Image (cartoon, rainbow, N blue to C red):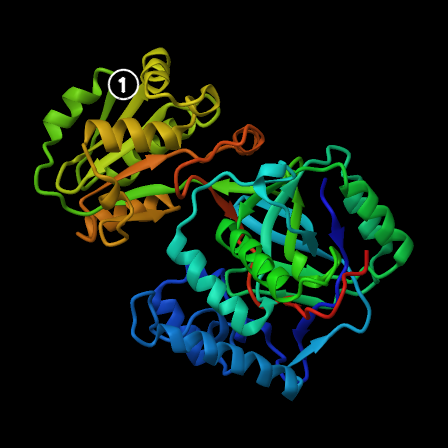
């Protein structure tokens, strides 16, 4: 069962950092190099200085030094009072107002707290995506140097009546401690809830919940590895030791404010691609509709094409396809029985046989196109984009050879896969908005116990 706890959060002192937009960043794994450079220029206190060293990729000779440098800098910020720590433990209700489109506004409610670390085998905390050992290794080095959770893991729980948020809102302070609009137009409000009766009620309500990791699989597994190291180092510390917990942002998966964006696949050149040959092989499993266009009507045709693709969002099995230099969009509409039979023969569990991301990865990319795992895991050959219009423009610009457009994985599918103990392919989901880095930080002191 889920064990949550309030904690004494660290946050930027507004007298030293009056504008949070100068110091916040997206999660480290979605920051591109150009953004990284911009964040460095914004402020000496920007979180990029901690979470990603300047120009340090995993194979950079200066990569090792960046972790020590981050640790020293984090300590300096604490000593200078750039970061302040709350005097009493709190849970932090967090509201995010955002737009999915110019005409569709949403509000996602959640809260920041500590979550007791559990091995996945217990079934209390459930992943749904693959992780990479290299990434976990470098995140662990950073965590060991800073002894802190610098950003929250984004996780979900089920609460159809939304009782947990009701109590947290009832007990929170009147005025938010953090209230700002980021550069993308997303509005953020964070409060404190410190009333012990409310906190104990929420702690009790959460104990029967399963936790589904939405974003931050690498950070969760890194926290597990950190916990194991600290238990060896401090064998006399009990279960309530702070290193047995990790900072999370929890949102109710039953709430309409939780959104998943599609993750379209962008492919670079590969020499043996034969469009007609691919389409002929694809016809064994898909009906293929063509949307021809010329320069005068391309935008209108693209709109119609994407509208038709979106109509398959609930039933699944449809994919868009576009190749540079070919004045057509292709819509592949799958034969559900044939595809299900194909995946069953490949020993995929039934719960995964209807997932568009599995069909695209294993049937289309790996089988019909014979693309290797090395290609699929190489960011120079395979990239991901969440905006279909941008994906098309990146192909037109020559940056990519082709794109496969896909509908987003649904929340209920994520829950079903995680509940069954199954793992989706990499980049199967993109929860939006991301939980930004730089609002609340959790300092891990091995001599401290959590409050509950």
Splitting the image into 4 quarters, where does residue 247 fall? bottom right
| Disc 1: which residue | 286
Q: What is the x, y in percent for residue 181?
A: 60, 64
Q: What is the x, y in percent for residue 127?
A: 53, 41
Q: Residue at x 44, y 35 (%)?
A: 424
Horizontally, residue 44 falls left or right of residue 13, namely left
Q: Residues within 10 Å of mark 1 (few under 14, many from 20)?
A: many
Q: What is the x, y in percent for residue 216?
A: 52, 52
Which element is circle 1 on?
strand
Q: Residue at x 26, y 17 (%)?
A: 285
Q: Residue at x 73, y 32 (%)?
A: 160
In this view, the residue farthest toward the top is 337
Horizontally, residue 35 falls left or right of residue 142, namely left
344 vs 132: above or below: above
Residue 112 visible in image: no
25 vs 91: above or below: below
62 vs 252: above or below: below
217 vs 306: above or below: below
Horizontally, residue 319 falls left or right of residue 447, namely left
């Amino acid at each position: 069962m889920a064990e949550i706890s309030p904690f004494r959060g660290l946050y930027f002192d507004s007298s030293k950092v009056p504008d949070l937009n100068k110091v916040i960043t997206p999660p480290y794994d979605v920051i591109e190099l150009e953004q990284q450079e911009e964040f460095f220029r914004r402020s000496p206190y920007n979180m990029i200085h901690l979470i990603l060293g300047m120009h340090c990729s995993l194979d950079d000779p200066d990569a090792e030094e960046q972790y020590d440098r981050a640790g020293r800098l984090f300590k300096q910020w604490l000593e200078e009072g750039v970061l302040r720590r709350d005097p009493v433990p709190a849970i932090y209700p967090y509201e995010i107002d955002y737009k999915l489109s110019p005409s569709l506004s949403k509000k996602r409610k959640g809260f920041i707290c500590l979550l007791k670390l559990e091995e996945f085998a217990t079934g209390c905390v459930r992943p749904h995506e693959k992780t990479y050992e290299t990434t976990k290794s470098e995140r662990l080095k950073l965590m060991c140097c800073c002894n802190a959770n610098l950003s929250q893991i984004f996780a979900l729980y089920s609460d159809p009546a939304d009782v947990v948020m009701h109590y947290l809102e009832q007990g929170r302070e009147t005025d938010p401690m953090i209230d700002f609009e980021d550069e993308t137009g997303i509005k953020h409000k964070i409060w404190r809830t410190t009333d012990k009766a409310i906190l104990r009620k929420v702690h009790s309500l959460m104990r029967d919940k399963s936790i589904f990791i939405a974003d931050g699989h690498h950070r969760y597994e890194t926290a597990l590895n950190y916990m194991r190291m600290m238990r060896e180092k401090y064998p006399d510390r009990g279960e309530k030791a702070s290193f047995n917990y990790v900072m999370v942002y929890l949102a109710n998966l039953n709430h309409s404010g939780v959104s998943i964006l599609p993750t379209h696949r962008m492919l670079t050149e590969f020499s043996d691609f034969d469009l007609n040959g691919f389409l002929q092989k694809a016809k064994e499993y898909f009906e293929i509709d063509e949307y021809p266009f010329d320069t005068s009507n391309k935008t209108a045709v693209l709109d119609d094409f994407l509208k038709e693709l979106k109509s398959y969002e609930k039933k699944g099995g449809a994919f868009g396809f576009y190749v540079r230099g070919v004045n057509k969009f292709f819509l592949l509409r799958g034969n559900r029985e044939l595809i299900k039979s194909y995946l069953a023969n490949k020993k995929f569990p039934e719960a995964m046989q209807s997932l568009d991301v599995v069909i695209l990865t294993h049937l289309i990319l790996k089988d019909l196109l014979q693309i290797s795992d090395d290609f699929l895991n190489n960011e120079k050959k395979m990239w991901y984009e969440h905006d279909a219009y941008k994906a098309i423009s990146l192909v037109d610009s020559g940056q990519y050879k082709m794109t496969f457009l896909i509908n987003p994985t649904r929340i209920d599918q994520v829950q079903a896969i995680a509940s069954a103990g199954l793992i989706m392919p990499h980049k199967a989901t993109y929860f939006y908005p991301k939980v930004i880095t730089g609002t609340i930080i959790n300092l891990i002191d091995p001599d401290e116990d959590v409050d509950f």
